[in-house]
Image (cartoon, rainbow, N blue to C red):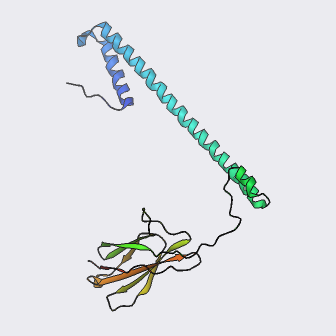
Amino acid sequence: MAESLPRKESELIQFAKNFMQTIIADFAGYELEEADADELEEAFVEALTAFEGNKAKQHAARAAKALKDTKIKRLTAVIRQKARRIRASGNTPNSKIARLGLRVRDEILTRVGVPETAPVFEILLRRTRHIIRFWEEGSKRRRRKPKGVIGAEIYQKIGEDGEFKVLTFAANTPHTIDYDMPDVGKQAYYYLRWVTRRNERSEMSLIHSATITG
């Protein structure tokens, strides 16, 4: 039967130290020979030396990494500070900025227009709660917004005879809408429109509906 020994190396070293010292002091009482005690002591010393050496290397590696991180952080800060000064002068042409490996700015700023497509969205049901997840048409991650868009306006009405009104603005997806118990069993209808930084709006999305559950 295999003996159950400590798995943690530091605990195993302490266990082995006691085991070795006890055997050396009374190897005959454990029906062992002096050669057994010598072999045990040799194995313990070799393991202890390797263990302590490895621990020292780990401490040194952590110190080296901390020093490296500090130096890299300072280098990054210095580069950014110099880059800001170069850009701030406004006299350095893009060709020279590109030669430094920096990204050049558009010489002619292009206006971001209204998205050509409306938001795509789905409604997830929770107790007295609708969770609306919206994204740009064609987005595989189902989180992306079109360029220049800051969020979506959510329009809502309760029941077929209700009128659509702006319920809220959602900067991020998903967006949660909570209902009260008296609304349970009613049908909620939604459509969304993208809103740009210029406060422009896209076409309205398709209308989706879901029951308010309790």
Percent of width and height locating residue 13: 37, 25
Which image quadrant: the N terminus?
A: top left
66 vs 118, left or right, is right
Asked which quadrant contains residue 60, the reply is top right
Q: Residue furthest bottom?
A: 161
Q: Quadrant of residue 95?
A: bottom right
Q: Which residue ends up furthest to the left in the rendered image?
A: 1
Whether 81 is drawn above or below 139: the answer is above
Q: Taking 54 as reference, is 20 above or below it? A: above
Left or right of 186 on screen, residue 134: right
Image position, residue 43 (x, y; %): 37, 16
In this rendering, position of residue 107 left or right of residue 145? right
Above or below, comparing residue 21 to residue 189 in the picture: above
* Quarter of the C terminus within the rendering: bottom left
Q: Quadrant of residue 138?
A: bottom left
Residue 127 in picture, x, y percent from top left: 29, 74
Of 134 and 38, nearer the camera is: 134
The residue at the point 75 percent across, 53 percent down is: 96
Q: Nearer the viewer, residue 55 or 155?
A: 155
Q: Which residue is located at x 42 percent, y 18 percent?
A: 46
Count of numbered circles in the view: 0
**Along the viewing direction, whichever of 207 and 70 lies nearer the viewer:** 207
Q: Nearer the viewer, residue 154 or 51?
A: 154
Residue shown at the point (44%, 25%) measured from the top left: 51
